[in-house]
Image: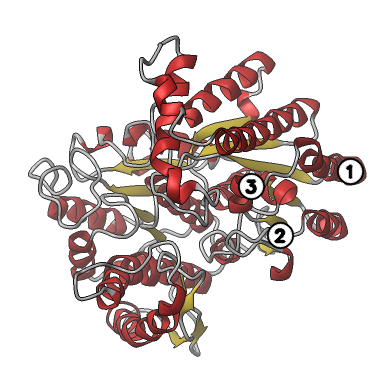
Amino acid sequence: MPVQKSPVQGRTVLLLPCDTRPPTLEHVAQLGRVCGVTVLTPPLALLNRLNLPGDPAALGEWLLEHAPQADAAIVSLETLCLGGMIPARRSSVPLEEAASHLEVLRELRRRFPQLLLLASGVVVRVAHGNDPHEEKPYYGQYGDALRAVSERLDLIDLGHSPADWEEVRSRIPADLLHDWLDTRDRNHALHVRAIDLLHEGVLDHLALTLDDTTPVGLAARDRRGLEARLDALGLWQRAELYCGADEVAATLLSRLVAGWARRAPQVYVRYPGVGCAGAGLLYEDCPLAELVKAHLRAAGCVAASSPQHADFVLAVNAPAISQAHEQPDRRTVDTPARNLPEFLDTLGHDLEAGRRVVVADVAYPNGAERRFSDLLRQRGWLHRLSGYSAWNTAGNTLGTAISAGVCAWRSCNDLARVQALFSRLIDDDLYQSRVRPRIKKLLSGPDGTGPDPYDLGEQLPRAEALLQDLWPRLAQKLWDEEFAPHVAATLALGVPHLAWPRLFTGVFPLKIRPMEGGLEPSVGEG
């Protein structure tokens, strides 16, 4: 009998991403290739570059032009309406002008009724740092005061009366405070209109996420308002509202894959300690286990009752008590309340039993835990993982890792799995946790003052020269030791560079080509 084609393989998805960084753009396409889904994206010239907005009108035209060849579209509301996630925090475009671009979604539904339309929006963050480039230009000077205003306004909304409200408000010029609050209100209104589009049937699914949030503040207030709207309209079966942002395109791709497969993937979650599920997080407003549940739901997954019944195991390398910024942290992260050797033993048993295993390392934000990564590499089965993630916030990491697991569950291309896995390892572990701190130290002055974290300026050429000196050797060593002995493929590294004039995000071009005879089968495939 002829082999029946997968209901996932051969699908085409249009992606309007939140920006052009590799994890938000190229990695989504990589995951699509794992399961045979083609992800089409607009020309880079139409998208934003850091805080320079893309072209909303041209992006709408691009969607309409390519919709006839697509099965689904994943649309960032900030990109469609305001030119990108970062421009949406900075732009003062009036509400009605921004909202006019939502009509593209109505037109897509009218002209292509079979097209699945999934949209995402990001509740405007109250940034933890004083970044004048990703936030309003005046945020560098007034960031501390704006965070205080955010907290006091939320407390007032909750019925409290902060005694210092007038004094806090006076720290910021009235016109700047008005502009900042107006921008937040406009974006919130766009999200409310998106909920209305969901209610009307224009959208099939809507994911609203909270970026770099805290339990108290204007983002929390916005969440309550959006929750109330979703409650009133009874839309929770087609909507999400949770902590995340940059990873949401991959999450919605996973939801599409699960829908086309007509079954929710079952996921068994493991932690390195019995109390790790309740760990506190630096950029989210809930305990770790609640964040995991939210990301599983958003990706179309359900929790498995046992590893034997799971489609994949999600191995969450978590802190014992709470995340910390600096490694190693023996007070709240790496304590006797977790056991990394036993954790890795168990994951090895999962692999030997034929189970897919995906690693999400959230012990620290903004990169892998070096101790865990070193122990992981000692095991000799790094190449067998179905996915890996350890970047930026816990939400970003979890969403990316879960998406890798879902796509590997429907894998038809093991070469693509290897490339997606290796791409995350060389970024999240090698660059974020090892090379980036080294470059920062080498760029620091005699007094230890580091480079401007928001704009390298004249130090950009030296930073990229250091990157090109330090990173390729580590990447080649990782391939030679962990992949080359096991995978019938060759690696060709391109020239790395920084995505934006700051150290936070690198671009790491590479090609992995099959050798004669192809690659070994996916672990647990079938």
Q: Residue 323 at what x, y percent from top left?
A: 25, 44
| Residue at mark 1 | 107
Q: Nearer the viewer, residue 487 or 430?
A: 430
Which type of secondary structure does the marked residue at label 3 adopt? Answer: helix
Residue type marked 3: Ala
The residue at 26%/73% (across/down) is: 444
Q: Residue at x 62, y 41 (%)?
A: 121
Would you say residue 333 is visible in this rendering?
A: yes
Callout 1: SS: helix
Q: Earlier in the sequence, mark 1 or mark 3?
A: 3
Q: Is residue 416 above or below residue 349?
A: below
Residue 115 percent location from the top left of the image: 80, 46
Q: Is residue 391 left or right of residue 104?
A: left
**Which residue is found at the position 40% from the left and 11% from the top?**
160
Q: Are marks 1 and 3 in contact (CB under 8 Å)?
A: no
Q: Which residue is mark 2?
A: 54
Q: Verify CB contact (< 8 Å) between mark 3 and mark 2.
A: no
Q: Secondary structure at mark 2?
A: loop
Callout 1 crowding tier (Cα within 10 Å): few <14, some 14–19, many ≥20: some
- Write down the residue under mark 3: 88
Quarter holding residue 384: bottom left
| Disc 1 to disc 3, C-alpha distance | 23 Å
